[in-house]
Every structure is written in structure tokens, then in C-alpha cells.
Image (cartoon, rainbow, N blue to C red):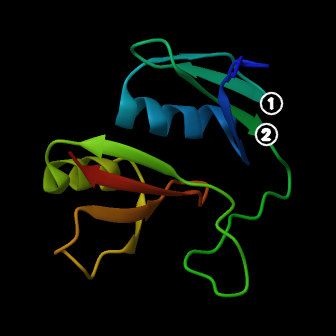
Amino acid sequence: MAALAKLGPVVLDCPDPLALAGFYAGVLGGTVEGEGDWVDLTLPGGASLAFQQAPGHVPPEWPSPDGSQQFHLDLTVDDLDAAERGVLALGAKPLDAADRTRGFRVYADPAGHPFCLCAC
């Protein structure tokens, strides 16, 4: 089937676009561009994330039987422990830190969006 469109950046609503772009630049690398209510993060390899100011942003709850996490990012890492130390130092909060037997761990970014670190 022929594509009708190409995927552009994944856009995250947040209260402070520059701060959240800085968090993800610390996690994924890349270049932060822009300021104000829209900030882009161009990642190594060409993919991009964008961050849009959303006054009154309410982060999703995870886990929540009554609500939805809306979306989450799966970030592949070589060393879960080292990556965890890094994201926590950048301001992530653990959401599911009790089970160390799985190949993934769940966190919230500084604006409350859930993301997973996943072992290769």
C-alpha cells in the first residue's frame, strides 16, 4: 500500500517546552532549536521530537485503571542501570521501579509523560 503521508515529529504538550526539550536532549542527544511555545529537538539520525506549550497541562496518570496514559516512548538502551541513573539525574521520576526482573523500566519525564527504558 502506498503511503498517504510521512510521519513528522512526535509532539509533546508540556508546560515548559525548552526545559522538556533539554531533558530529552540529555537522554537522546540531538540539537534543541527554538524557544517560546514551540521547541524542536532534532535527534541523531534525523528523527525529531517537538514540544508545545500547553497552559494547564495535566500529565497522564500511570498506571490508571480509570484513565489512559495517552502515549509513551520506548527508549532502547544497552545498560538499564546506567540509563536509569542518567534519566533520574536529568529529572525523570520512576513510576515502576519495584520489578527489576523485566527488560524494561517505566518513568515519567519532568512534565509527567510516561516513557520506558528498554534493554536491547
Q: Which amino acid type is shown beneath numbered disc 1?
A: Asp
What residue did someone put label 2 on? Answer: 53
Whole-percent x and y of residue 109?
50, 54
Q: Which amino acid type is shown beneath numbered disc 2?
A: Gln
- Is 101 in front, or is 92? 101
Q: Are marks 1 and 2 in contact (CB under 8 Å)?
A: yes
* Residue at figure coordinates x 53%, y 54% from the top left: 110
- Is 105 in front, or is 24? 105
Residue extending furthest front? 1
* Residue at figure coordinates x 79%, y 39% from the top left: 53
What residue did someone put label 1 on? Answer: 37
* Residue at figure coordinates x 30%, y 75% from the top left: 97
Determine the image quadrant of residue 11. Answer: top right
Looking at the image, is 97 positioned above or below residue 2? below
* Residue at figure coordinates x 33%, y 53% from the top left: 117
Horizontally, is 19 left or right of 84 in the view?
right
Whole-percent x and y of residue 20?
57, 40
Residue extending furthest right? 55
